[in-house]
Amino acid sequence: MVTNDNTFPFDGHRFQIPPGPKRRSYAKAKVDVWQHLDGQLEVRYQGQSLVTFMPTDKWPVRVEKFSPAAGQEAPEKEPEHQPKRMQPKERKPYKPADNHPWRKS
């Protein structure tokens, strides 16, 4: 979601979208951010590319957490022995005394 100042947050940074040929501002618009394998970011609105940001360094793209494809999961580990949990003590409901102010009517 683009904020009122025509910026959007991504990975802890704020990126500004320049005015486009069809719109001056994309405030409150929902945009798609595509991160390519070479590290560049492409901002798209309704399928049209608005701007591309090039990476400042030539390091490999940082890979975040991912889940393996179907059929490539790691083998399941046997469950480890876990100690028994103590059962909580049974609680008795609180009963006010006979001379409690709420009992006087």
Image: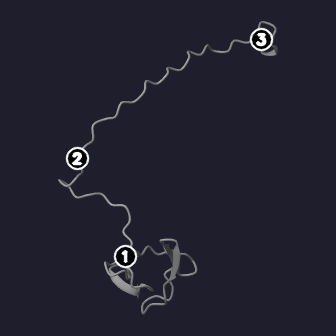
Crowding at mark 1 (Cα within 10 Å: few <14, some 14-19, many 20+): some
Residue ID at (78%, 15%): 102
Query: SS class of the residue under badge 1?
Result: loop
Q: Amino acid at mark 3?
A: Arg
Q: What whole-number distance in Å separates the C-alpha atoms at marks 3 and 1? A: 70 Å
Query: SS class of the residue under badge 2?
Result: loop
Q: What whole-number distance in Å separates the C-alpha atoms at marks 3 and 2? A: 63 Å
Number of numbered callouts drawn = 3
Taking depth in this image into account, of 93 and 1 the one nearest to the observer is 93
Residue on which disc 2 sits: 75
Q: Residue 72 location, x and y as percent? A: 20, 55
Does 15 sit left or right of 46 as displayed? right
Residue on which disc 3 sits: 103
- On residue 61, the disc is 1
Query: SS class of the residue under badge 3?
Result: helix
Q: What whole-number distance in Å separates the C-alpha atoms at marks 1 and 2? A: 28 Å
Q: Amino acid at mark 1?
A: Val
